[in-house]
Image (cartoon, rainbow, N blue to C red):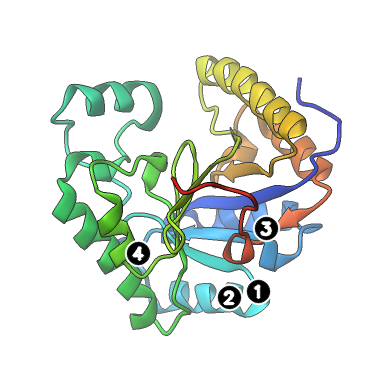
Amino acid sequence: MSTHHPIHSALISIHDVMPEALVAVDKLLQELGRIPPDRITLLIVPGRSWTQSDIAWLHAQQHQGYQLAGHGWLHHCSKPRSLYHHLHSRVLSRDVAEHLSLDSSQIHALMARCHDWFADQGLDNPTLYVPPAWAMGNIDRSLLQALPFSQYETLGGVYHSDSDLFEKLPLTGYEADMPSRAVFLRAFNRYQRLRAAQARLPLRIGIHPRDLQYRLASDLRRDIHAVTQALNYRNYRPAGLQPA
């Protein structure tokens, strides 16, 4: 069962924002109504089939204060080429971890293209990049520092490229579309909440568009209502970290 204790602070993001998910995302935003819009980050997948009305929706969300971030390009990858990617797909990512089928230069090009897309649509430049399934793949930090993003989020935490600092931060997820995933994620989330509470760290709450239809919907609702302070990724800077 999900905790009823307050969550001291949280970084909240909605993943997989793409044209075919906008209706579900709208429902999530209604559910998150108690959280100020500028404390919610929408992770945008640029390479999908965006219409002018879809782009207008993004402008409307940005105008309300929601933060927009980059989230891959297609959110879909080819057949895994490595054993690691194959295992990652089976256990975590299925067919969405597109970075894992690319080499370093291809990953760099994908992220640069992602960033440029926002300006092409007349949107604010994103400062945060989150690879699909939080899987960054094989790319050197020097290449990340050369890109215009200032923050990168992976499964383990958030990397601040401007200061070369990586902060390990707890993370909860709710994409439990099968019983086995529900069992795993419930235990995983319980441990992550405990980490956040004991270390007084922000809890990253990663939400996917259809989570309210899945088996941990009640856990998600309880966690959202337990948040005492929602933080803004764009303004969030960790204190007292040593260089990574």
Locate the C terminus by quadrant: top left
Q: Which residue is mark 3?
A: 29
Which label number is shown at residue 62?
2
Please, what secondary structure does the residue beneath circle 4 have? Answer: loop
Residue extending furthest toward the bottom: 122
**Residue 139, placed above or below residue 181:** below
Whichever of labels 3 and 2 marks the residue nearer the N terminus, that label is 3
Residue at image coords 56%, 57%: 23
Whichever of labels 1 and 3 marks the residue nearer the N terminus, that label is 3
Q: Position of residue 204 (x, y in %)?
A: 62, 43
CB of mark 3 within 8 Å of CB of mark 4?
A: no
Between the residue at mark 1 and the residue at mark 4, the CA separation in whole angstroms equals 19 Å
Q: Position of residue 75 (x, y in %)?
A: 33, 49
Is disc 1 surrounded by few (<14), some (14 to 19) or many (20+) residues within 10 Å?
A: some
Between the residue at mark 1 and the residue at mark 2, the CA separation in whole angstroms equals 5 Å
Between the residue at mark 3 and the residue at mark 2, the CA separation in whole angstroms equals 13 Å
Is disc 2 surrounded by few (<14), some (14 to 19) or many (20+) residues within 10 Å?
A: some
At label 2, the amino acid type is Gln
* In the foreground, 91 or 203: 203
Between the residue at mark 1 and the residue at mark 3, the CA separation in whole angstroms equals 12 Å
Q: Which residue is mark 1?
A: 65
Between the residue at mark 3 and the residue at mark 4, the CA separation in whole angstroms equals 20 Å
